[in-house]
Image: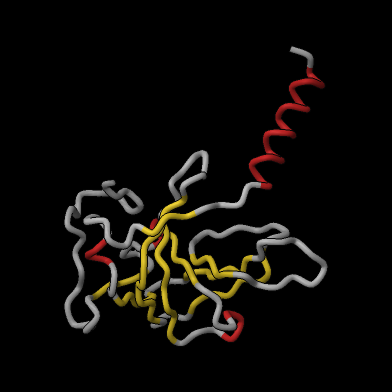
């Protein structure tokens, strides 16, 4: 195949994937996710929160917060803060991406306390792969009993449909 044609195809594919806006479906009532809704998780190791803008403009405004490690860089990122140890995240809902080509990108909508000033009341989403004991300890809403996943043999981010 012609080297220039292959390069053009790869650049076009990357451009199309980058221009795609993720669409999500609420899966909070799914039996595999119901036990997690209402959990309170405490940060026990450095965890990054990234401000994200949906439109790349000169004066970037944050549309939502994406919480996960190691994180990312790029023109859509508006800030990065490390959540201090002891920060509490209450899980409000679960969602998955319906049009992501390589991953279903499971995330939990969370309320962060104390909320960093940079959040400005924007919605915050914790990536499922960061909801693991090395980053946080999770409890039922009363924060007295640890929550054990229904099937503790699963790896982080692996959930039954």
Could you tell me which residue is drawn at 62 percent across and 66 percent down? Answer: 52
Q: Is residue 145 left or right of residue 14?
A: left
What is the quadrant of residue 95 in the picture? bottom left
Residue 80 placement (x, y as % from top left)? 61, 71
In the rendered image, residue 79, in percent from the top left (x then y), is placed at 65, 72
Q: Where residue 46 sits in the image (x, y, percent)?
A: 47, 71
Q: Nearer the viewer, residue 132 or 119?
A: 119
The quadrant in which the N terminus is found is top right
Q: How many marks?
A: 0
Q: How is the image coloured?
A: secondary structure
What residue appears at the point 51 percent right and 44 percent down from the top-left corner? 99
| Residue 161 drawn at (x, y percent) | 28, 46
Residue at position x 17%, y 77% in the image: 145
Q: 139 or 60, which is in the foreground?
A: 60
Front residue of this view, candidates 30 and 75: 30
The residue at 30%/72% (across/down) is 137
Q: Is residue 64 left or right of residue 137?
A: right
Compared across the picture, whether 151 is left or right of 75 comes to left
Give the quarter of the image for residue 9. top right
């Amino acid at each position: 195949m012609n080297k220039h044609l292959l390069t053009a195809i790869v650049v076009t594919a990357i451009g199309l994937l980058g221009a795609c806006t993720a669409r999500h479906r609420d899966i909070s009532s799914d039996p595999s996710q119901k036990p997690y809704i209402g959990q309170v998780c405490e940060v026990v190791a450095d965890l990054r929160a990234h401000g994200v803008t949906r439109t790349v403009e000169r004066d970037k405004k944050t549309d939502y917060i994406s919480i996960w490690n190691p994180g990312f860089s790029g023109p859509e990122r508006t800030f990065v803060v490390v959540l201090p140890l002891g920060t509490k995240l209450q899980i409000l809902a679960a969602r998955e991406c319906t049009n992501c080509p390589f991953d279903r990108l499971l995330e939990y909508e969370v309320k962060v306390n104390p909320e960093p000033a940079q959040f400005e009341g924007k919605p915050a989403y914790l990536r499922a792969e960061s909801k693991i004991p090395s980053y946080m300890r999770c409890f039922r809403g009363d924060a007295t009993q640890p929550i054990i996943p229904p099937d503790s043999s699963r790896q982080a981010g692996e959930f039954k449909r």
